[in-house]
Structure formats: C-alpha cells, structure tokens
Image (spheres, rainbow, N blue to C red):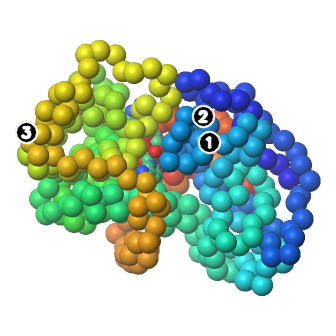
Amino acid sequence: NQRIVLASRPFGSPKADNFRLEEAAIPTPAAGEVLLRTVYLSLDPYMRGRMSEAKSYADPVAIDAVMVGATVCQVVSSKNPKFSEGQWVLAYTGWQTYGISDGSDLMPLGDNPTNPSFALGIMGMPGFTAYMGLLDIGQPKNGDTLVVAAATGPVGATVGQIGKLKGCYVVGVAGGAEKCRYAVEVLGFDACIDHHSDNFAEQLAKACPQGIDIYFENVGGKVFDAVLPILNTGARIPVCGLISQYNATELPPEPDRLSLLMGTLLVKRIKMQGFIIFDDYGHRYHEFASDMSQWLAEGKIHYREHLVEGLDKAPDAFIGLLEGKNFGKLTIKIS
Ligand code: NDP
C-alpha cells in the first residue's frame, strides 16, 4: 500500500516536502468492513485548507496522517453484506492505493460503470457545487449576464454551461488563450477573458456591456476587483471559493476596499452568499443527479478531465492546481 501523508504544514504555496510518500502493509478488513483499491483520486482546491491548522468548516489533516480526498475504488474483499468483490464505489479513502471503510461513507457506482471517474467531477462534488450555487443562490434568468472564473475547471465550466441552458449571456475568466478558446468554442460561452492580460479589467468590462447580474465567485482577488464596479443593481454573488487567496500569507495590499464593497452591496442591493456544498445542499443531491445525467446523455454538457497517472505524482499535480496548471478536472489515475 502506497500512501501520501502530510509531512509538514505549508507557509504560502505548498512544496513537495510538505508531503511524504510511504509504503505500508495492505490493511485487512475487520467484520463489517471492506477493503478498497483506489482507481481514481480526486484533487481539489479545498485540500489546501486542510493542510493548514486554521479553523475552518472541516478539521485539518493531522501531521503524518494520510491526505484526505474522495476516491473511486473497487471492492477487493468484503466483510460487509452490502458490498461485494469487484463492485465500484465512491469513497473517501484519501491519497492512498488501498483503504478500509465500514461502508457508511460509500456510494455504490455499480458493477460496470461507463465513466467511473465522473463521480469525482461532473456527477460529483464539483458538478453539484456548480448546479446548486448557480441555481439556488445565483437565480439565473433569461438574458442575465453571468460571469464565472476558473472557467475551464469542473465548477466554472459547469456553471457557465448551465448558465447557457438557462438563457444567460456567459462570460468566463480563465488563465491563458488556450483555456479561453476552449471556453468559447467547446463550452459555448459567449466570451472568455484571460486574467493574465495587462488590461484584464478593461477587457472584462467590454465583454459585459449590460453589466453583471450574477458573479459566481471562485477566485477572489483581482478578478473580484474587476467585477465589483460593473455589478448591476440586484446582482447575486454565490461565494463558492477564493482560490487566489488560498496560499496567501498576509492581507492584500492597501488600499482597504472593504467600505467600497459594503457600499456597493448596499446601494445596488446585491445578495452575496457563501455555501459549503454537502453541508448546505446534501439533501438535494438527487435533483442535481437527475438533471445532470439527462444533460450529459443529451450532449448538453461537456466535461473535461485532466488525468495524471500515478499516486506519486499527486503532490506536484496538486501544487499545480493552485497555480492554474490543470486544464479540466484534476484526477489521479492509479494503475
Ligand atoms: P479548478 O479545477 O478550476 O482549479 C482551480 C483553478 O483556479 C485553476 O486551474 C486556475 O484556473 C484558477 N486559479 C488559480 N489561481 C488563480 C488566481 N490567482 N486567479 C484566478 N484564477 C486562479 O477548481 P474547481 O473547479 O474544483 O474549484 C473552483 C472553486 O470552487 C475553488 O475556489 C474551490 O475551492 C471552490 N469549491 C467550493 C465548494 C463549496 O462547497 N463552496 C465545492 C467545490 C469547489 P485558470 O488557469 O483558468 O486561472
């Protein structure tokens, strides 16, 4: 059994030596438990938060403990009557090649799923996040201008595509020309602006001639600074993530924009609401699953994965995720 543990807590960007690859014996399941072999491991931005000691909505990973994460696994052996050998499951066994579960946290995916890894992306946590954040908090209406950053990642790409299905004018923000081209040509966004360009704020304003009705917040920082002045009266802001700040070690430079933000919220009667997907919407997963499986079957939603082979590649791939090096849902394939 190979596993990656948290060796030390990062200051700023995580480094390779914050992780340690270990060899351990393959665990033996006790009565009621199943032994799982990891086939896919999901790497997600929230893991940066778990590497820190700071209090959040979930406990940090302890030093020397296996890094947390959702996995798609096959049952190797079962001492739990609900699961049988060979069955595929969505599990939370983390960054390791074998794991044990008592079954309570497993979601069965069948004996022969067509796209097992989709359970970590478009049919799983990121897709669900996009769906609930946009539909429940964003309240899209026909003709609304919707802006979303990290536009080619699993959350942003799904937000924009659902926005199109709801009749929105969709403007993406992404890192680089290739990602922007993909957002427009494949995902069907109306425009996509590269946040690395010098006159990014100017370009964004030009791409949103009617202002912004929904800003789906994935990144914060300079993207939010560019969005704030062009928000419309009555705009909605689902606050999903602030990835540009996850590696920050200090507050952003002066001037303090807090009163500008509060003033804008007040004068323009803007609704800004954070959410944590499973805590707030876990009970509505079936609504999402039913709509999304239909959209996928009808070819209305595209899903792109960025597959990386080998557990040992997970630390580097994860460090890259926080720098925009992934292009699509970052997933580790374990052979
Ligand atoms: P992505 O696969 O989209 O990966 C993150 C992307 O963020 C990068 O590829 C990069 O894309 C972009 N990015 C990184 N740094 C910056 C920066 N400084 N400025 C602008 N963009 C940056 O991730 P996900 O789709 O999985 O997640 C998107 C967001 O949703 C994250 O903030 C995540 O924490 C949040 N989230 C929240 C949940 C909730 O329950 N609230 C649940 C799931 C996700 P690019 O190169 O295009 O800039």
Task: Indicate which disc, 1 or 3, sits on the residue closer to the N terminus.
Answer: 1
Task: Indicate which disc, 2 or 3, sits on the residue closer to the N terminus.
Answer: 2
Q: Which residue is mark 3?
A: 267
The tag on residue 53 is 2
Q: Secondary structure at mark 3?
A: helix
Q: Marks 2/3: CA distance?
A: 37 Å
Say if 10 sits above or below 51 in the image.
above
Q: Secondary structure at mark 1?
A: loop
> Label 3 crowding class (10 Å Cα cut-off): few <14, some 14-19, many 20+?
few
Residue type marked 1: Pro
Q: Nearer the viewer, residue 183 or 130?
A: 130
Residue drawn at x 34%, y 30% is 221
Q: Which residue is mark 1?
A: 60
Left or right of residue 225: residue 234: left
Q: Quadrant of ligand 1?
A: top left
Q: Marks 1/3: CA distance?
A: 38 Å
**In the rendered picture of this protein, how many numbered marks are placed on residues?**
3
Residue drawn at x 62%, y 27% is 10
Q: Secondary structure at mark 2?
A: loop
